[in-house]
């Protein structure tokens, strides 16, 4: 034991105890008799402990303290007596923590732990909404007072501080155990006949959650050759369903899009023939949808299964029904605690009111989830009482009439989140919404307020995380790095969005045009009718749209707005997203939309006209084409431009050396993807705040060196993607790492043909956290890491590489959290040293050989033997269909 343990302890006592005592000034009537007792006795205990430590510090020279003096302190009867006194007083209130105090060895450690307990007590009594509601605020203030990270972790573990909640969709198992077992038995039973099983229950009861849990169950993944998830909905389009199902069997091509429905169905039948498959048809409403699909699912008497989720118990299907029930009072309380508290345990002073709240949700999981989102925001007794009283007014005995319960969650939203939430109603029901696109749309609509030094996009991301934490939005996809990639909204909450928008006159009025999966009602609802004209027509008049959003082109037929919009409304258009409608040339009518903030367009001749600069308010420009695109020099005259995305082959920036001087583009944050030409470099020198950059073009020189402009001056650049378009079959030398900005955190390489032995060069990047090595980014059969290592790397992705042998140790990746290996069929194994990385959380292996999958499993078992059960391993030797789209996706 060293001096460094005692000295901070003494500082904590002197600096922190006065603040702790001040924290205890609360209203006594808010607490129980035991609480009041502690309010009166705790300050005295604090002063007693401080006095003893002062006495000890005065009587000993701490600078020369040695082991012998520590032994003497352990024998100090005064200190030991005071500790026993404190432990006795704590025994009834915090028995678990007192046990921890007792288990510690030595008086000094007991003092340290007792201080932890006292901190917990202080937080237990704190009821200040301003200073002790948000976890970050508490942490910062306590750290300033001198508290250690260990003490903060103990506070969080004990449930006394509000914690940041995981934004994942909470698939709590409470109450589903029996249902899961029964359905697993039906899905994997001995019957060889194709069986149809229907999970029946009211909206919000957890049908989809249970179906997802079954779909992802490891034994289900192993048992079935093919798994398919298909979201149906009340307003479905048969063609959408067929294309969605087919995409889970084969790679859908343009040829498939030109097929008739019957031809698509035949493709599905052939793909499933002879396979043991599981098909989940989520949210099916009537017999018609089932009858239109049933014929395409062959019965080869091999144990195939079809699982339906429906609200209609009266469906006359060839199905065995499994009806879900409401949760019991006990299950509801457990579920609510699991969703609000990280450790699943409610603090005693919130226990009674929390239990009352759970009872008022009447066993409905969706109501529990929404209510949990409210409770997570504040951990004060007064606020929880307010929620309980509100629920008593909103929730009724009839579970079918609980829309007002959802409205309560909206009523508690702060004003800055309301337009962001209502805006979700413009997307199709229960579709996947790209997080990046949603954030850009929010910014373009002007919903985001500038906060300090944060960018609008960062603030928008905070808004989204807040909505996720309130369970108003659900995570549907995550990226390789664990970040939220896509989200969706429950159909009931989407209905709430539209209802509230109607009531409050929320703007914008939303019209959509393009290929969509259903008649998309708007906010307020617009009349939308079928358009028989093909989607490739260039004759669509822009005078008949106001706000335009298009769903993916593969999802269905063409719809357009059924009523014209006046010229003033047309001029006020801010969002024009027609990227999924293929047109032959850039429509000049677009240039009249002087208030446009967001433009996404796809055309055969992708080159925008020089008059694009007329759109002076444009913030986001997305251009897609099958041809190469030349970005006109006038594009840089748009001072408001924040994000430029070019999606085509090889994109050039028009040379402006003979033109006028381009001023600094302070707002520009994204340029992707462009050819690294001299004119590109000239533009980059005028983008001081650029955060994301993508180079696509000839990146390998004739001398076999990876080359592109020196971008070390881009001090804010965080994300860089390099995609080489020149085929090169010999190993390429890496560029000078000094060419990269120091703040770079994410690097993605494709077709760069680097020598494995030279890849360590990127380890010199001081802040690199994500390294994605995609197809042919590295050449060679052996990767032996050097002593340089990747000090801060959290994610390493290897995909479509010919590597055979990989040798490394934990020292080379000391902070690695995720390892993703895909389509590396020749790689023999994951190095055993990877399993020794203390921070490792996930290993994913898919489309690889059996030996590498076994090595990943071996690493996991070794970790479990060492007591580490947090490492997750996902392996798939054959095609992994779990990552396929499960619902329509709005990217």
Image (cartoon, rainbow, N blue to C red):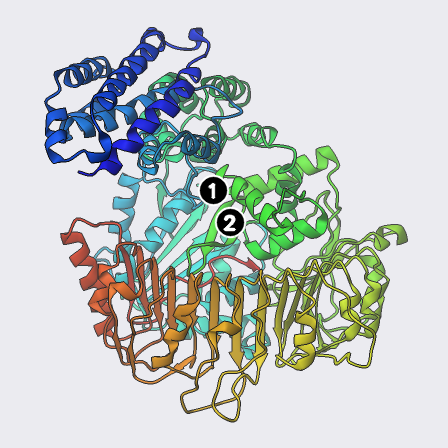
Q: Nearer the viewer, residue 825 or 522?
A: 825
Return the residue at label 1: 312
Q: Nearer the viewer, residue 472 or 183?
A: 472
Return the residue at label 2: 286
Residue 796 picture quarter: bottom left
| Image location (x, y in percent) of residue 283 | 48, 49
Residue positioned 83% across, 52% down in the render = 572
Q: Is the C terminus in the top left, top right, bottom left or bottom right quadrant?
A: bottom right
- SS class of the residue under badge 2? loop
Any mark on residue 381, and which? none
Q: Nearer the viewer, residue 70 or 754?
A: 70
In the displayed structure, 673 sits above or below 193; it is below
| Image location (x, y in percent) of residue 277 | 34, 64
Residue 517 picture quarter: bottom right
Residue positioned 71% across, 75% down in the render = 603
In the displayed structure, 123 sits above or below 667; it is above
| Image location (x, y in percent) of residue 49 | 27, 17
Residues under labels 2 and 1: Cα distance? 8 Å
| Image location (x, y in percent) of residue 497 | 63, 39
Is residue 715 toward the left or the right of residue 860 in the image? right
Is residue 392 toward the left or the right of residue 72 in the image? right
Residue positioned 10% across, 22% down in the render = 75
Q: Is residue 440 visible?
A: yes
Is residue 343 toward the left or the right of residue 889 in the image? left
Q: Nearer the viewer, residue 886 or 231?
A: 886
Mark 2 or mark 1: which comes first in sequence? 2
């Amino acid at each position: 034991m060293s001096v460094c343990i005692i000295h901070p302890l003494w500082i904590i006592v002197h600096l922190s105890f006065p603040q702790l005592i001040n924290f205890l000034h609360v209203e006594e009537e808010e607490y129980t008799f035991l609480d009041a007792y502690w309010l009166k006795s705790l300050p005295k205990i604090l002063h007693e402990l401080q006095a003893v430590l002062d006495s000890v510090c005065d009587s000993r020279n701490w600078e020369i303290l040695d082991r012998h003096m520590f032994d003497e302190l352990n024998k100090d009867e005064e200190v030991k007596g005071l500790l026993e006194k404190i432990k006795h007083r704590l025994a009834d209130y915090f028995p678990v923590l007192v046990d921890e105090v007792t288990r510690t060895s030595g008086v000094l450690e007991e003092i340290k732990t007792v201080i932890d307990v006292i901190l917990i007590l202080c937080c237990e009594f704190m009821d200040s909404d301003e200073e002790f509601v948000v976890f970050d605020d508490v942490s910062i203030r306590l750290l300033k007072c001198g508290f250690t990270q260990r003490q903060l972790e103990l506070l969080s573990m004990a449930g006394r501080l509000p914690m940041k909640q995981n934004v994942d969709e909470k698939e709590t198992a409470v109450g589903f155990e029996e249902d899961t077992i029964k359905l697993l038995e039906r899905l994997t039973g001995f019957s060889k006949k194709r069986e149809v099983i229907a999970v029946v229950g009211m909206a919000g009861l957890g049908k989809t959650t249970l179906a997802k849990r079954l779909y992802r169950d490891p034994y289900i993944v192993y048992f079935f050759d093919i798994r398919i998830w298909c979201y149906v909905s009340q307003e479905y389009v048969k063609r959408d369903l067929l294309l969605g199902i087919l995409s889970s069997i084969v790679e859908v091509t343009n040829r498939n899009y030109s097929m008739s429905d019957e031809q698509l169905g035949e493709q599905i039948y052939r793909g499933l023939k002879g396979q043991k498959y599981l098909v989940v048809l989520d949210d099916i409403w009537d017999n018609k949808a089932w009858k239109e699909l049933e014929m395409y699912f062959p019965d080869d008497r091999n144990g195939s299964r079809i699982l339906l989720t429906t609200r209609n118990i009266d469906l006359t299907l060839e199905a065995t029904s499994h009806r879900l029930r409401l949760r019991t009072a006990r299950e509801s309380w457990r579920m609510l605690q699991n969703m609000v508290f990280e450790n699943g345990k409610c603090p005693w002073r919130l226990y009674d009111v929390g239990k009352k709240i759970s009872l008022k949700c009447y066993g409905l999981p969706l109501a529990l989830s929404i209510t949990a989102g409210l409770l997570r925001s504040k951990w004060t007794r007064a606020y929880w009482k307010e929620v309980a009283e509100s629920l008593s007014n909103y929730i009724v005995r009839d579970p079918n009439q609980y829309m007002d319960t959802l409205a309560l969650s909206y009523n508690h939203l702060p004003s800055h989140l309301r337009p962001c939430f209502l805006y979700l109603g413009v997307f199709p029901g229960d579709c996947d919404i790209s997080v990046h696109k949603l954030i850009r749309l929010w910014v373009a609509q002007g919903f985001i307020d500038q906060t300090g030094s944060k960018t609008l996009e960062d603030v928008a991301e905070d808004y989204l995380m807040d909505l996720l934490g309130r369970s108003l939005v659900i995570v549907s996809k995550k990226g390789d790095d664990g970040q939220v990639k896509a989200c969706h909204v429950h159909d009931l909450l989407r209905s709430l969005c539209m209802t509230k928008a109607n009531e409050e006159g929320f703007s914008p009025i939303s019209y959509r045009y393009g290929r969509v999966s259903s008649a998309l009602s708007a906010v307020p609802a617009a009349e939308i009718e079928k358009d028989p004209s093909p989607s490739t027509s260039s004759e669509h008049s822009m005078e008949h749209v106001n706000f335009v959003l298009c769903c993916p082109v593969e999802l269905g037929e063409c719809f357009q707005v059924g009523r014209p919009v006046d010229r003033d409304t047309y001029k006020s258009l801010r969002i024009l997203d027609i990227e999924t409608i293929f047109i032959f040339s850039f429509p000049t009518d677009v240039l009249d939309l002087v208030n446009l903030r967001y433009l996404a367009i796809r055309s055969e001749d992708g080159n925008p006209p020089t008059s694009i600069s007329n759109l002076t308010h444009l913030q986001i420009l997305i251009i897609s084409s099958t041809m190469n695109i030349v970005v006109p020099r006038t594009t840089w005259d748009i001072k408001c431009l924040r994000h430029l995305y070019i999606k085509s082959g090889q994109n050039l920036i028009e040379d402006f050396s003979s033109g006028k001087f381009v001023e600094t583009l302070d707002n520009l944050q994204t340029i992707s993807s462009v050819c690294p030409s001299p004119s590109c470099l000239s533009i980059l020198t005028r983008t001081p705040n650029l955060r994301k950059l993508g180079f696509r073009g000839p990146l390998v020189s004739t001398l076999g060196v990876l080359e592109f402009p020196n971008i070390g001056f881009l001090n804010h650049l965080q994300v860089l993607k390099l995609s080489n378009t020149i085929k090169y079959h010999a190993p390429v030398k890496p560029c000078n790492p000094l060419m990269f900005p120091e703040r770079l955190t994410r690097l993605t390489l494709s077709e760069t043909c680097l020598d494995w032995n030279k890849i360590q060069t990127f380890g010199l990047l001081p802040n690199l956290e994500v390294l994605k090595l995609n197809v042919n980014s590295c050449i060679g059969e052996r990767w032996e890491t050097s002593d340089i290592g990747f000090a801060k790397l959290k994610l390493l992705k290897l995909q479509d590489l010919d590597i055979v042998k990989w040798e490394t140790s934990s020292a080379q990746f000391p902070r690695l959290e995720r390892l993703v290996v895909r389509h590396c069929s020749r790689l023999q194994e994951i190095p055993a040293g990877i399993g020794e990385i203390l921070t490792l959380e996930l290993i994913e292996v898919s489309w690889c050989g059996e030996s590498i999958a076994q090595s990943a499993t071996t690493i996991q078992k070794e970790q479990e033997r060492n007591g580490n059960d947090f490492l997750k391993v996902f392996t798939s030797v054959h095609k992994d269909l779990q990552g396929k789209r499960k619902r329509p996706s709005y990217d």
